Amino acid sequence: MVLSVLIAVTVVSSIGAGLAAVLTISEYFLSNYGPCQITINDERKLTVQGGKDLLSMLTAEKIFIPSACGGRATCGLCKLKVLEGAGPLLPTEEPFLNREEKESNVRLSCQVKVRNDLKIEIPPELFAIRQFSCRCAEIIDLTYDIKQFRFELKEPKTIDYIPGQYIQLLTPAYEKNSEEVYRAYSISSDPTDKNNIELIIRLVPGGICTTYCFEYLKVGDEVKINGPYGNFRLSDTDAPIVFIAGGSGMAPIKCILHQMKNEGIKRKATYYFGANTIKDMFMAEQMRTFEKELADFCFVPAVAKPQGDEKWDGQIGLVTEVFRRDLKDATEYEAYLCGSPGMIDASIKVLTELGINKDNIFYDKFE
Ligand SMILES: Cc1cc2nc3c(=O)[nH]c(=O)nc-3n(C[C@H](O)[C@H](O)[C@H](O)COP(=O)(O)OP(=O)(O)OC[C@H]3O[C@@H](n4cnc5c(N)ncnc54)[C@H](O)[C@@H]3O)c2cc1C
């Protein structure tokens, strides 16, 4: 009896081991496309081992294409032209490309698998994007779910960026996540300090990067970032400004306010900052200081739902309700919005109803 059980166990284990070996070998052959050549802008040639997506292969070669979702085809930022070798457009790419882009072979580099030789075109300015080794120098609690992180640049030691731009933070593999991923974070610091980058990060429950930042990252740890990226920035007109943000959307607006102070920009500006409850409000003191330092700046914090025992003598209501009441006519304004997609879409709707020219609305959606 015991012998037959032993024989059965041995047979089942051997079949299991055999199947695992077959799977490993077939995966190796199916995803191994051998060496492939990527020709960039008709000048530079890279030889890579085929099998992975184009975005991660370029990143491994230190060519940094903007991307904010870590290759999940949800941000649509990693566009580039693939002139030869990409195969047909995938349904995951369709929603992000207009007709003109499709006709000129624009693709999402995170969705294009490198299986053969490719010919691609990359805007030359992207070659200027660098990777920076940093040390986490400071972590400050701003609210129960928002922290400010300061990263001191070690190599290279300084960064040049336009206020409003973002960097990508590399999350290493850790206990709760087996692969490195990049996520986008807007720079919040004073741009005159080129040796440090500050970020304002909100914890997304279960999120890969924010869980790492909140639960694992410690002062003194090494961190890698790359950048700068993005077109969100102050225009050089004299139009009055309305800034609208919520939560960690504070980050790029704060950076632009530093810029206005540093460069003596005297434009009229009103900043509507929305928080759900008083516990979600932060940096009000610093914004009051900007009111004293800038020529014509006003900070309007708004709390949507003050809780029963909370004392709040500022504006009450959704940020959209508050600026609708206040602004009345936005025809002459430029608007700079930052935060969740829901808040941005709702703000664009109200601003349009208040008469703003759509070309004068600039935003970064944190999606
Ligand atoms: C240009 C740009 C700039 C950004 N700047 C900032 C910034 O300054 N500060 C900041 O905190 N974030 C910023 N973000 C958002 C940030 O890049 C990440 O998406 C976010 O921190 C979540 O990353 P994660 O790895 O923790 O979560 P993931 O592992 O990517 O996501 C976990 C789950 O949560 C969902 N999810 C992702 N993001 C959110 C969200 N914001 N709210 C609710 N659910 C979400 C996902 O769909 C997924 O289901 C920015 C995004 C963009 C595109």
Image (tube, grey):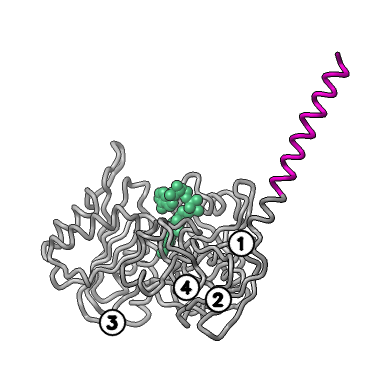
Question: 261 or 42: nearer the eye?
Answer: 42
Q: Nearer the viewer, mark 1 or mark 2?
A: 1
Amino acid type indicated by mark 2: Arg
The CA distance from mark 4 to mark 1 is 17 Å
Q: Earlier in the sequence, mark 2 or mark 3?
A: 2
Q: Earlier in the sequence, mark 3 or mark 4?
A: 4
Amino acid type indicated by mark 1: Gly
- Where on the image, by quarter, is ligand 1? bottom left
According to the image, label 4 marks what residue?
Answer: 82
Q: Earlier in the sequence, mark 4 or mark 2?
A: 4
Q: Quadrant of the N terminus?
A: top right
According to the image, label 1 marks what residue?
Answer: 51
- In the image, what residue occupies the spot 22% across and 72% down? 359
Q: Nearer the viewer, mark 3 or mark 4?
A: 4
According to the image, label 3 marks what residue?
Answer: 236
> At which x and y percent is residue 243?
27, 65
- Which stretch did the figure color magenta? 1-24
Which mark, residue 334? none
Question: 127 or 313: nearer the eye?
Answer: 127
Amino acid type indicated by mark 3: Asp
Which mark, residue 130? 2
Which of the 4 quarters of the picture holds residue 286?
Answer: bottom left
Residues packed near mark 4 inside 10 Å, few (<14), some (14 to 19) or many (20 plus): many
| Kind of element beneath mark 1 | loop
- In the image, what residue occupies the spot 82% across and 29% down? 10
The CA distance from mark 3 to mark 1 is 45 Å
Residues packed near mark 2 inside 10 Å, few (<14), some (14 to 19) or many (20 plus): some
Amino acid type indicated by mark 4: Val
